[in-house]
Image (cartoon, rainbow, N blue to C red):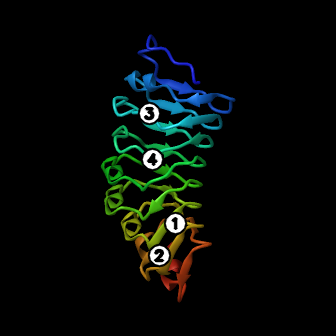
Amino acid sequence: MVPCSLHLTFLKVLVLSANSFLGEIPMSLGHLHHLQMLDLNNNTLQGKIPALANCSKLTRLSMAWNQLTGEIPVDLPSRLEALQLGANNLTGTVPVSLGNITTLKRFSFAVNNIEGSIPAEVANLQGLQVLYVDLNKMLGPFPQPILNLSNLVFLSIASNNFSGVIPSSVGTSLPNLQQFGIGRNLFQEHVPSSLTNAS
C-alpha cells in the first residue's frame, strides 16, 4: 500500500514511481488539496483509481504501468494538463466528462481494455498535443472528434478494432502531426493524400 498522511496537507509534489508498492491507492490522497503533481508510475498497485476531484490544483497525474482496474473516473481534476493511465487493466469507455478538462495537453490510456470509441466531447480539448489510445478494444469508424484537435503532435490509435476508411481530411485537419499510428486496425481503401499537408 502507498503510504499517505493526512498531515501533509500542503504537499504539492508526490513522486513514488519505480518502486514495488503493492495494494490499493489510499483514498486519503484525495484530501491533498494543494497537490499539483502525483506520479505513481511503475509499481504493482491494484484496485480502482481513487476520487481525486478535490485535488483541484492537480495538473499532472501519472499512474501508468500498474495493475489498476475499474474505469477511467468521470470526476477527474479540472486543471489536468497530463493524464497517463497506460499499461493497466482498466475497462469501460472513455468518459464524456473528459471533454471538460480543457487544459489537457497529454492523454494516454494505451495498453488497457477500454472499449467503445472516442466521445464527441473530446473535440473540446483544443490544446491536446499527445493522444495515445493504442492496444485497447476500441471499435467503430475513425474517431471524428480527433479531427478537431489541430494541435495534435503525437497520435496513435493502433492495435484496436477501428474500421472503415481514414478521413480524406486527416492531414489538413491535423497539420502539426509528427507521429501518426494506425497500424493493426481494420481500415480499408486508400491512404489519404492529405497526409502530405502534415508538414
Q: Earlier in the sequence, mark 2 or mark 3?
A: 3
**Residue carrying label 1:** 177
**Is residue 2 something one can see in this rendering?**
yes
Q: Is residue 181 left or right of residue 123?
A: right
Q: Earlier in the sequence, mark 1 or mark 2?
A: 2
Query: Is disc 3 surrounded by few (<14), some (14 to 19) or many (20+) residues within 10 Å?
Result: some
**Residue carrying label 4:** 71
Residue drawn at the location 33% of the way across and 54% of the way down:
96
Residue type indicated by callout 4: Glu
Residue type indicated by callout 2: Gly
Find the distance from the CA under tag 4 to the CA under tag 3: 11 Å
State the residue in front, 91 or 147. 91
Q: Earlier in the sequence, mark 1 or mark 3?
A: 3
- The quarter of the rendered structure image containing the N terminus is top right
Q: Is residue 9 left or right of residue 157?
A: left
Find the distance from the CA under tag 1 to the CA under tag 3: 34 Å
Q: Which mark is residue 171?
A: 2
Mark 3 lies on a secondary structure that is: loop
Residue type indicated by callout 1: Leu
Q: Are marks 1 and 2 in contact (CB under 8 Å)?
A: yes
Q: Earlier in the sequence, mark 4 or mark 2?
A: 4
Q: x, y percentage for residue 164?
A: 47, 82
**Residue carrying label 3:** 50
Residue type indicated by callout 3: Pro
State the residue in front, 51 or 42. 51
Foreground mark, 1 or 3? 3
